[in-house]
Image (cartoon, rainbow, N blue to C red):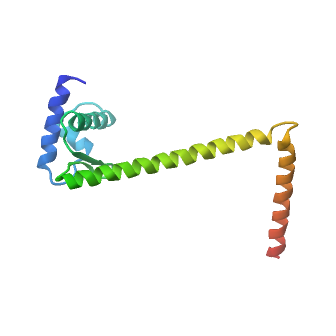
Amino acid sequence: MGEGDYELAERLVERLRQCMQPVTAIELARFLELGGGREWQRRKVRRLVQIARNGGGHAICANLAEGYWKARSGVEWDEYCDAVKRNTCFKFVEMRRCQEAVTDAANEQGQLFDVGGRSEERRGSDVTHLKSSYFREESHAT
């Protein structure tokens, strides 16, 4: 992080203060005259927003669909922070569920191929159960 980054972050904050609508990362990159490709520009803007938030104490909100904007009040900033926290918790719970599902699937797969263990007995009972439920459904269909 160079000294110029702090100046760019302050210019970014000033631009957001002037705008009544959210501004996209690419629009901010053009305003700041950042070179490079679009992805690099987006990353640089995210970094500048981080500097403005952490180093400058500026309340800058972000939304993937809309862009960046300066919170107009403490209430708006608090609501934004609460929404980010809820979204983070939701993502964490979803990630944990996916991890558990993958672990469960991996464990079940490992048990299917456990030669000489209980899994052969279990596999046989699972096949019997599947056959019996298939035939029950088939008899109801006719």
Give above or below for 2 relative to 141: above
Residue 25, given in percent of the width and then of the height, sits at: 26, 42
Residue 97, given in percent of the width and then of the height, sits at: 56, 48
- The residue shown at (51%, 49%) is 94
Q: 15 or 119, which is in the foreground?
A: 119
Which quarter of the picture shows residue 127?
Answer: bottom right
Q: How many marks?
A: 0
- The residue shown at (19%, 41%) is 58
In the drawing, does residue 17 fall left or right of residue 119?
A: left
Residue 134, given in percent of the width and then of the height, sits at: 81, 64
Q: In which quarter of the image is the C terminus?
A: bottom right
Q: Quadrant of the N terminus?
A: top left
In the drawing, does residue 111 fall left or right of residue 79?
A: right
Residue 19, given in percent of the width and then of the height, sits at: 14, 50
- The residue shown at (80%, 69%) is 137
Q: 119 or 136, which is in the foreground?
A: 119
